Amino acid sequence: MSTDPTLDPNTLARLVVDALERTAFVLADPCNEPEQLPPADTFAQIDFSGPTQGSVELLASRAFAKNLAASILGTDASLVTDLQSEEALRELANIVGGSVITALGGSDCRFSLGLPRLGRAPATGADTTCVLDAEGERLEVHCHHARAA
Amino acid sequence: MSPTPSSNGLNCHVLVVDDSPILRTAIKKVVKLAGVPEDRIFEAGNGVEALDVLETVWIDLVLLDLNMPVMDGEQFARELRNRPDLKDVAVVVVSTEANRERLERMKGLGVEHTLRKPFEPEALCRLISEVLGVKPA
């Protein structure tokens, strides 16, 4: 297995879109004009370790997190609490984190995930980034995966 | 003995163990779709809480996340296998876990089935039916 894993933006976007569709039936597409989307004001992050150390950060507009929670719960977005919105984004970070380490590690994956958490300001200088348009709402995913273990 | 379908749904008890309350809710819905009545579906936020449930209720199937605080899924499975009264409870891992060595250790603990997140609800439904030995709902 390579000790210098890579992940391109298209692959990262595909992993996130797949996670959204399978987990919550939420549709999203890569966005070429991210400035048109609402700003991100909700953050979730998960770290991983193994051949390299890294993290996956999710930055989303508040309405995206609310819509995500509503889809997972099968309820109307107006009934979703802020806590449920945060839980939904944290769980999405967990799922995307799992997909990322699988993509990096392949069938002999030696990466391990930490626990997802909320509220940390995003780090700069991500190795791979994608911005998705989820029915007019923003979801940014930043992946840091090239730090030596 | 395999659970039997009845007019009240599958005659079995399922425990959902995941530290994410929102995902527990989603998984419980799928378990219900598989035919298990709502009052026979239990939940726990970590391994310690799961053991507490198992001490009070007979459980046929545990749907187990691995990465959890307090007591993770691997610790829980090890604890389960060390208890003579609980060692035969069926366990299915439902997790983002990708680490090959850890998944091998889970197999060593008798956990044969793993469903990776993200999963489609139908996949979990089929797996529940398969492990419980009943036809899919």
Image (cartoon, rainbow, N blue to C red):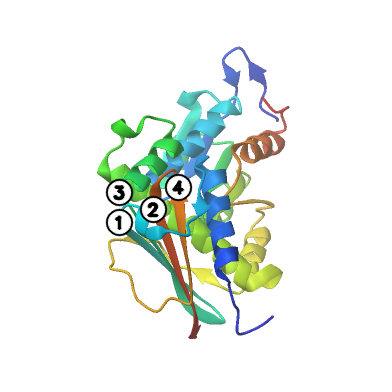
Front: mark 3 or 4: 4
Which secondary structure, mark 2?
Answer: strand
Q: Mark 1 or mark 3: which comes first in sequence?
A: 1
| Same chain for the residues under marks 2 and 3 in the image | yes
Q: Is residue A30 above or below residue B14?
A: below
Front: mark 2 or 3: 2
Q: Mark 2 or mark 3: which comes first in sequence?
A: 3
Q: Which residue is mark 2?
A: A138
Mark 2 to mark 3: distance in Å? 9 Å
Which of the labelled discs sits on residue A39, or is there none?
1
Which secondary structure, mark 4?
Answer: strand
- Residue beneath the point at 55% across and 64% down: A12
The answer to whether residue B70 shows anywhere in this view is: no
- Residue beneath the point at 57% across and 68% down: A101
Q: Residues within 10 Å of mark 3 (few under 14, many from 20)?
A: many
Q: Which residue is mark 3?
A: A62
Camera-side residue: A91 or A79?
A79
Place residue A9 in its image quadrant: bottom right
The answer to whether residue A107 shows anywhere in this view is: yes
Mark 2 to mark 1: distance in Å? 7 Å
Q: Mark 1 or mark 4: which comes first in sequence?
A: 1
Q: Is residue A145 above or below residue A121?
A: below
